[in-house]
Image (cartoon, rainbow, N blue to C red):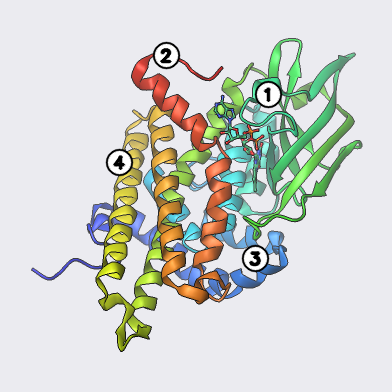
Amino acid sequence: SSSPDPRDFLDLDAELSAEDRAMRDAVRSYAQDQLLPNIAEWYESGALPAAELAKGFGQLGLLGMHLEGYGCAGTSAVAYGIACRELEAVDSGLRSFVSVQGSLAMYAIHKWGTEEHKQEWLPRMAAGEALGCFGLTEPDAGSDPGSMRTRAVRDGSDWVLSGTKMWITNGTVADVAVVWAQTDEGVRGFVVPTNTPGFTANEVKHKLSLRASLTAELVLDGVRLPDSAAFPEVRGLRGPLSCLNEARYGILFGVVGAARSCYESALEYTLSREQFGKPLAGFQLTQRKLADLVVEVNRAGLVALRIGRLKDAGTLHHNHVSFGKLANVRSALEVARTARGMLGANGISLEYPVMRHMSNLETVLTYEGTEEMHALSLGQSVTGLAAFR
Ligand code: FAD
């Protein structure tokens, strides 16, 4: 039989259903035509045509795509993962856009919201006509969200929210913010239209990573909401953590795309660039690196696919997701760092995707649970001993 395809060495995509492959092809061709030609400019300027992107993603059915009803596509988890992979092959910021909308904001409303919340927001969000963000992190509460200071207090039947959220993706362009706050009954979630008086979003500037993504500080200064703004049932960190688990699933699939893009770049580059009279790819030291890259990309792809199958089977545990986030982000970063060097000086240029991916992956390592947090989750899972505090 013929030699394995260097771009899908383990032939993992043969494991996909015809539907999943159709999703792959649709996202790939959209990415090729609409995203890839613009990504360097978006990255360099730190600006993103959010409304236009939302419409395009909505038309493709990528927003809340694995949710059921309310205008959502209701695809398999694997199809959602593959879509994340193809978006993140362009840029982690674009995958983040879709993750925050679908897996954080829409998922929170779908899982914990009232029927009115769902009717009001989900169909427009699925279509990309309304954007959402998810406010959990604060300046002084990151890995330990239980220490958040944002508070919601009762005033008659109303709620009044005060506090600051930090590092909130899409905060400056969101129509609705899902905000988590302390109450007398523990942490609760609130659906906050961003035009409510007292709500402001300020852009976070000076980022050297995830530049093709809008990041905000949210200031809640006595934001008054009706009783109906709160998620009725859920109390405590179970609420936000359930959403993060969804988004982390998209990440562990997505980073396979970023890794693949870096590997393909390094492969193409070293095959065509000559030094000492022959292609760089012909040197043993380079081949050692290419072998490492193809192993990491395919191993991460296999981990993602397995976790996707568990999710579709309904047997996925959050510790599986910690495993995948830890393992695959680490692999992708190693691939990006190695590939960066293989392109020499061109490796630091925005003309090639590698340093952009490498820099993005530093954010991906930190958000949605740092590497250390997922290591502690895995440690607790295999030992039965919690070492978080
Ligand atoms: P810290 O928690 O202060 O951690 C700093 C370091 O200390 C890390 O290495 C951490 O692993 C380590 N550490 C902490 N505790 C321990 C411990 N017990 N043992 C050992 N080491 C420990 N948040 C949102 O809510 N919504 C968003 O949309 C969002 N988007 C983001 C977009 C970007 C570009 C970035 C950079 C972040 C985003 N975040 C968002 C925030 C992100 O989730 C947090 O940055 C993350 O949870 C880490 O929190 P922190 O930055 O406060 O770091």
Asked whether mark 2 and ligand 1 are closer than 8 Å, the reply comes as no
* Classed neighbour count for the residue bearing mark 3: other residues with Cα under 10 Å, few (<14), some (14–19), many (≥20): many
Q: Which mark is residue 43?
A: 3
- In primary-sequence order, the first of circles 2 and 3 is 3
- In primary-sequence order, the first of circles 4 and 3 is 3
- In primary-sequence order, the first of circles 3 and 1 is 3
Type of residue at label 1? Phe
Question: In the rendered view, would you say 242 is above or below 282?
Answer: above
**Residues at marks 2 and 1, CA–CA distance in whole angstroms:** 32 Å
With 381 as the anchor, is 344 left or right in this view? Answer: right
The local secondary structure at tag 1 comes to: loop
Question: In the rendered view, would you say 109 is above or below 124?
Answer: above
Q: Which mark is residue 231?
A: 1
Residue 168 position, x and y percent, is: 70, 43
* Classed neighbour count for the residue bearing mark 1: other residues with Cα under 10 Å, few (<14), some (14–19), many (≥20): many
At 15% from the left and 69% from the top, the residue drawn is 3
* Classed neighbour count for the residue bearing mark 4: other residues with Cα under 10 Å, few (<14), some (14–19), many (≥20): some
**Residues at marks 2 and 4, CA–CA distance in whole angstroms:** 26 Å
Q: Which residue is mark 4?
A: 306
Residue 68 position, x and y percent, is: 49, 39
- In primary-sequence order, the first of circles 4 and 1 is 1
* Classed neighbour count for the residue bearing mark 2: other residues with Cα under 10 Å, few (<14), some (14–19), many (≥20): few
With 388 as the anchor, is 231 left or right in this view? Answer: right
Residue 164 position, x and y percent, is: 81, 33
